[in-house]
Image: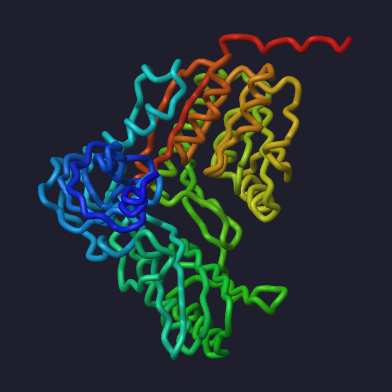
Amino acid sequence: MTRDRQRVRSSPTRLSLRIDDLAPGGHGVGHATVAGERRAVFVPRVALGDVVDVEVDLATRPARGKLLRLVTHGEGRVPSPCSYVDKCGGCDWMHLSADAQRTAREAHLRRALPVPYRDQPIIFHDPVAPLRYRTRARFHIRASGGRAVVGFHAAETRDTIGLTTCVALHPAIDASIALLGALLEAAHGVGEASVALGDHAKPVFDLAWHGTLSPASFARLEAAVNAGACAGGRIRLDDTTRPAVVGDPSPRMVGGDDAPIVLPPGGFAQASEVANIALARRVCELVAEVGGRAARSLVELHSGAGNFTVLLAREFPRVIAVESDAAACEAARRNLAARGLVARVTCADAETFALPPRTDVVVLDPPRSGAKGVSVALAASSVKAIVYVSCDAPTLGRDLGVLAQCYEPVSIESFGMFPGTSHSESLVALRRFRPPARRRPVA
């Protein structure tokens, strides 16, 4: 490599680009020829068809660009309803129209699918509301000098930017920004708070704090619970073995059966309660479609607190729900008991759980890392049907590539769980068309 080329790649360069693609993760992609080489440049907060001036660090691969000036608007760009859009790293597509978001999500999901599945139609479930939809959030907090800053990470960094409001949040969750700031006055350190709706749709939070808290913080929390500003909170400090609990910090959400589902403090649930109800009901419908109502045995992997389990246990005679988090398992048992339903809840690692020999249907909802080990096991099993829920198209595509050798798609669907962002929830129903390969006996 010549010295001139090294110098080009080690110092920022100003370029003009046309954005010709939106990549998974939300960045736009433009191309430029630098020192005789065609380079892809990833740029945040742009729309398809935008012409932009960017400052580019060509020392990275792929190259990363900082938006300096929007020269020409692309067709899908719209005014953002968020005043923090240029600073906050939360909603990366708030500047795109609903149609532009949907088109990009379809392209991302279709590209991620294995080749045999790519011509299949994709069913879209559009978001009910583009704003005020989030019924849970995770705030980053830093406190010093008697003041606490509550917000999200800034775009492209891990720095916390303070917010006074967020247009994506349910009003009760939005109000918790000011509540947390007031509770943490005179604190020192950094923390993270998971906030959700609790009893009577009032906010609850689970706070992990690294540093010191004023005794007044606990008194303020008690006062807030007594005044009805929140339903409860749990605070975990570095130097304590047990969290401090005030009120009832358990999140609650309406399940697909219109009855409440109670989660452990800080437990996982989907970002939008309304979208989750539609997703849960559709999962149950697809299980009946691909597995049949006469399915003898159904295994649900990564079952959480019973979001899908409470529906599946109504329809199928034998349901085994597998979840590694003990608190979530206990919550699932309580949610089933509250409905008079029976299912076997097993606390185990879904990736290594041995499927019973006569399992007919498997439902799985893994984390973003996917379910590679489960997919390999399913391909070698006699399971007749699979319903796979995914929050990450690339890992979904990887796992479906393993399953494509013996399962065919019955339905591929996308849910608008996170409007204004590049994230989406996918739902794929599969039916076996080829028996598993028989293992050769060991000589």
On the image, the x and y values in percent for residue 170 come to: 35, 60
Check the image and report above or below for 189 versus 439. below
Q: Please, which residue is most extreme toward the front here? A: 2
> In the figure, is residue 141 to the left or right of 305?
left
In the rendered image, the quadrant that contains the C terminus is top right
Q: Residue furthest right?
A: 443
Q: Could you tell me residue 213's position as x and y percent?
A: 56, 85
Res. 246 image quadrant: bottom right
From what the image shows, is residue 359 above or below residue 238? Answer: above
- Viewport quadrant of the N terminus: top left
Instruction: Say if 433 sits above or below 83 in the image.
Output: above
- Where is residue 29, by image quadrant? top left
Left or right placement of residue 292 versus residue 20 in this view = right
Q: Residue at x 38, y 40 (%)?
A: 24
- Work out whether residue 23 or residue 354 is closer to the camera in this orientation and state it: 23
| Residue 46: percent from left, percent from top | 23, 49
Q: Nearer the viewer, residue 315 or 148?
A: 148
Q: Which residue: 21% across, 45% down?
A: 47
Residue 434 percent location from the top left of the image: 60, 9
Judge by depth and name the residue closer to the eye, 125 or 7: 7
